[in-house]
Amino acid sequence: MPIAANLVIALIALLHAWFLVLEMFLWTRPLGRRTFGTTAEFAAQSRVLAANQGLYNGFLAAGLAWSLLLSGSEALHVKCFFLGCVLLAGIYGGLTAARKILWFQALPAAVGLMLVLLA
């Protein structure tokens, strides 16, 4: 079970690193606009806000990656904290921005948290 939990955490960390790239560097480009369903005008106007959001996703990715380097109860607490942050952000985003966020962010975090707690 610990291996499965760590694999899910690594996947979530990689997803959030990708979100960072999309929001900080590709937001106004065709791939970023297609991914988030925005127009060129909206993307240009919201570029700074998206970059800020991307930075936060980067912090989540870094925290999850850091948790994989720890062991014992310290690892458990850090994993639970960052997975909890991702889960809450995913629920909030799913309720306020786009329902698909529940599937791409909240669900993987919930699965990861369950696996960590069962390990």
Image (spheres, rainbow, N blue to C red):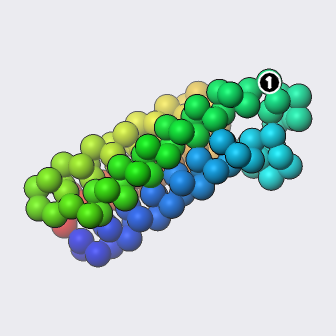
Q: 106 left or right of 75?
A: right
Q: Is residue 55 above or below residue 73?
A: above
Task: Pinpoint residue 59: horizontal percent, then vertical percent.
Answer: 44, 43
Q: Is residue 56 above or below residue 31?
A: above
Q: In this view, does 40 lie above or below 75?
A: above
Furthest residue toward top: 45
Q: Which amino acid does label 1 sit on?
A: Gln
Residue 86 in sight from this viewpoint: yes
Q: 20 left or right of 29?
A: left
Quadrant for residue 45, please give it: top right
Report the front residue among 8 and 73: 73
Task: Pinpoint residue 27: horizontal percent, then vertical percent.
Answer: 75, 41
Q: How crowded is mark 1: few (under 14 residues within 10 Å), some or many (20 or more)?
A: few
Quadrant for residue 113, please give it: bottom left
Quadrant for residue 69, please give it: bottom left
Residue 94 in sight from this viewpoint: no
Please name the residue shown 83% across and 46% down the image.
Answer: 29
Furthest residue toward right: 40
Quarter of the rendering occupied by the N terminus: bottom left
Q: Is residue 3 above or below residue 65?
A: below
Q: State the residue position of label 1.
A: 45
Report the front residue among 101 and 68: 68
Numbered circles on residues, count: 1
Q: 48 left or right of 101?
A: right
Task: Pinpoint residue 4: horizontal percent, then vertical percent.
Answer: 33, 73
Q: 65 left or right of 13?
A: left
Quarter of the rendering occupied by the C terminus: bottom left
Please name the residue shown 57% across and 34% down the image.
Answer: 53
Q: Report helix, strand or loop for mark 1.
A: helix
Please name the residue shown 70% across and 46% down the image.
Answer: 25
